[in-house]
Image (cartoon, rainbow, N blue to C red):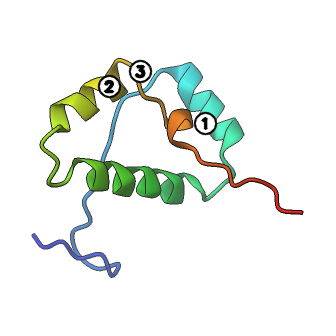
Amino acid sequence: MSNNTDGKGYRPRLSVEIRQDQYDKLERLIPWGMQKHLFEAIVDDLIFMLDDNTNKELIIGAIITKNVRLWDLLVIPEKRE
C-alpha cells in the first residue's frame, strides 16, 4: 500500500468515536463539505507542533487535560483603521 493521495489507490483515514451530542453539534456548526478541510488543518498543525519536539508528551498531556485549548491558540489580528 502506498501513500497515494491522487484519488487512486489506498488513502489513509482517521476514525475516532465521538458522543452523539458532539456529532450533532459538528453537523450543525460546520458547513457541508468543510469537515475534511477543517480536520485536515487541525491534524497538520498538531503534526507540526509534535514533529521533532522533545516536549511531545507535555503537549499531548496539555491538550488531553484541556490545559491548552484550540481557542487559546487563536490569534485574531487587530482591526486596522
Q: Quick one: label 3, few (<14), some, or many (20+) residues within 10 Å? A: few
Q: Position of residue 58 (x, y in %)?
A: 22, 29
Q: Quadrant of residue 66?
A: top left
- Residue at screen point 61% across, 59% down: 33
Q: Looking at numbered disc 1 in the image, what kind of residue is underneath it?
A: Leu
Q: Is residue 17 left or right of residue 25?
A: left
Residue 26 disc label: 1
Q: CA distance from mark 1 to mark 3?
A: 19 Å
SS state under label 3: loop
Sequence-wise, which precedes: disc 2 or disc 1? 1
Q: Nearer the viewer, mark 2 or mark 1?
A: 2
Camera-nearest residue between 81 and 8:
81
Using the rendered image of the protein, determine whether residue 13 is visible from the camera's viewpoint. Answer: no
- Residue at screen point 33% across, 48% down: 46
Q: Residue furthest right?
A: 81
Q: Position of residue 49 (x, y in %)?
A: 29, 49
Q: CA distance from mark 2 to mark 1?
A: 23 Å
Q: Residue furthest front?
A: 81
Q: Is residue 59 left or right of residue 2?
A: right
Q: Looking at numbered disc 2 in the image, what kind of residue is underneath it?
A: Ala
Residue located beneath label 3 in the image: 66
Camera-nearest residue between 37 and 69:
69
Q: Looking at numbered disc 3 in the image, what kind of residue is underneath it?
A: Lys
Residue located beneath label 2 in the image: 62
Q: Quick one: label 1, few (<14), some, or many (20+) residues within 10 Å? A: few
Quadrant of the image for the C terminus? bottom right
Q: Position of residue 54 (x, y in %)?
A: 12, 43
SS state under label 2: helix
- Residue at screen point 45% across, 57% down: 41
